[in-house]
Image (cartoon, coloured by chain):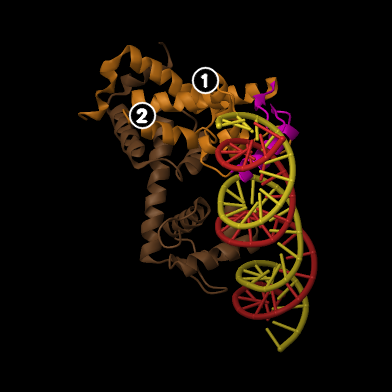
Chain colours: A brown, B orange, C red, D yellow
DNA sequence: ACAAAGTGTTAGGCATGCCTTACAATATAA
DNA sequence: TTATATTGTAAGGCATGCCTAACACTTTGT
């Protein structure tokens, strides 16, 4: 389980780091702790693991950076997240907050096939909005 | 977290016990261990917790039975499971195995609103099968 | 009734992942 | 430059949930 699969916990860290990079934020451990609402101690442990797995670069008091490998992983997770969120919002008409919350959890466990189908259905519903009447009548 | 919320692990046990009851199977700990592919020792621990929380009745070497409370919980989980599985199969056209596998995991974390919407969309698609063309063309 | 098969439990471990406390190191602002 | 704020980490805990090994108990078949 060391080389390939990331636990859902580590995926969350990687994703948060990636989002910080997207926002061009200089992220340190303490900031990550604040973002994730987790203790600095826990973040410290997690960062060590991520460094060990060569997914991030990080030295004490420095800025956290994704390695190319880490970025690859981050993009995977983040895109799962977005596929789910869009699907919940656009197809199932769920509120943004709830879509976000569910996406965050489900992203770690859902299969690729299901994501692919969701993506297709989302884009279909965007083009054919009349298809979303399921929710109103029978 | 004691009185109300079940961990996803315990939900799995409860669900497996419920399914055994549906099949009119006399279930003991060892059988449950086989069903879930888990050691007898782990099952033994879990059953103690479930007895403690008054979700099952169980004595060593006896048959495991759900209490009314346990049955209530089981039905909740099981119906989530089925809503997800049906949705994946009927709306997203995923294979039964994959639908099952994903349902098993997601049932523990998905919100009620999303389940409700999935249910509606599933029944809509059953009545209007032409709606599932999203998967073929644009 | 007694051996074999099946079942249950305890003890000791491992992994994940979170916490608080206490302290150490660095950065920053006066 | 020195005090304050920020950041990092080590130690010791807790909870979940899984494992194996070893042992104990019950059931079953002959």
**Residue A35 is at least partly visible in this image:** no
- Say above or below: B137 vs A24: above
Judge by depth and name the residue closer to the eye, D2 or A22.
Answer: A22
Would you identify the image quadrant in which residue A38 lies? bottom right
- Say above or below: B10 vs B119: below
Q: Chain of mark 2?
A: B
| Horizontal arrangement in the rendering, residue B94 relative to residue A36 (left or right) | left
Would you identify the image quadrant in which residue B128 lies? top left
Counting other residues with Cα less than 10 Å from the Cα at mark 2, is it few (<14), some (14-19), or many (20 or more)? some
A16 drawn magenta: no
- Say above or below: B106 vs D8: above
Q: Name the residue located 57 percent from the left edge and 45 percent from the top edge.
A: B39
Question: Residue A74 placed where, x, y %?
Answer: 41, 55
Counting other residues with Cα less than 10 Å from the Cα at mark 1, is it few (<14), some (14-19), or many (20 or more)? few
Lower position in the chain sequence, tag 1 or tag 2: 1
Question: Residue A47 placed where, x, y %?
Answer: 54, 65
Q: Which residue is mark 2?
A: B96
Q: Which residue is mark 1?
A: B23
Q: Name the residue located 62 percent from the left edge and 35 percent from the top edge.
A: B29
Q: Which residues are magenta?
A: B40-67
- Say above or below: D28 vs A65: above
Question: Residue A134 placed where, x, y %?
Answer: 39, 17
Q: Chain of mark 1?
A: B
User: Element under label 1?
Assistant: loop
User: Element under label 2?
Assistant: helix
Judge by depth and name the residue closer to the eye, D18 or A21.
Answer: D18
Judge by depth and name the residue closer to the eye, B61 or C12.
Answer: B61
Would you identify the image quadrant in which residue A43 lies? bottom right
Q: Name the residue located 55 percent from the left edge and 25 percent from the top edge.
A: B20
């Amino acid at each position: 389980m060391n080389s390939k699969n990331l636990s859902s916990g580590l995926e969350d860290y990687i994703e948060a780091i990636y989002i910080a990079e997207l926002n061009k934020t200089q992220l340190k451990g303490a900031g990550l702790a604040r973002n994730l609402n987790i203790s600095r101690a826990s973040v410290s442990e997690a960062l060590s693991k991520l460094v060990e797995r060569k997914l991030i670069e990080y030295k004490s008091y420095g800025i956290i950076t994704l390695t190319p490998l880490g970025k690859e992983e981050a993009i995977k997770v983040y895109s799962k997240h977005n596929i789910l969120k869009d699907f919940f919002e656009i197809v199932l008409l769920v509120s943004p907050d709830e879509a976000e919350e569910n996406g965050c959890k489900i992203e770690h466990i859902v299969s690729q096939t299901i994501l692919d189908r969701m993506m297709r259905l989302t884009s279909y519903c965007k083009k054919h909005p009349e298809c979303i009447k399921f929710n109103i009548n029978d």
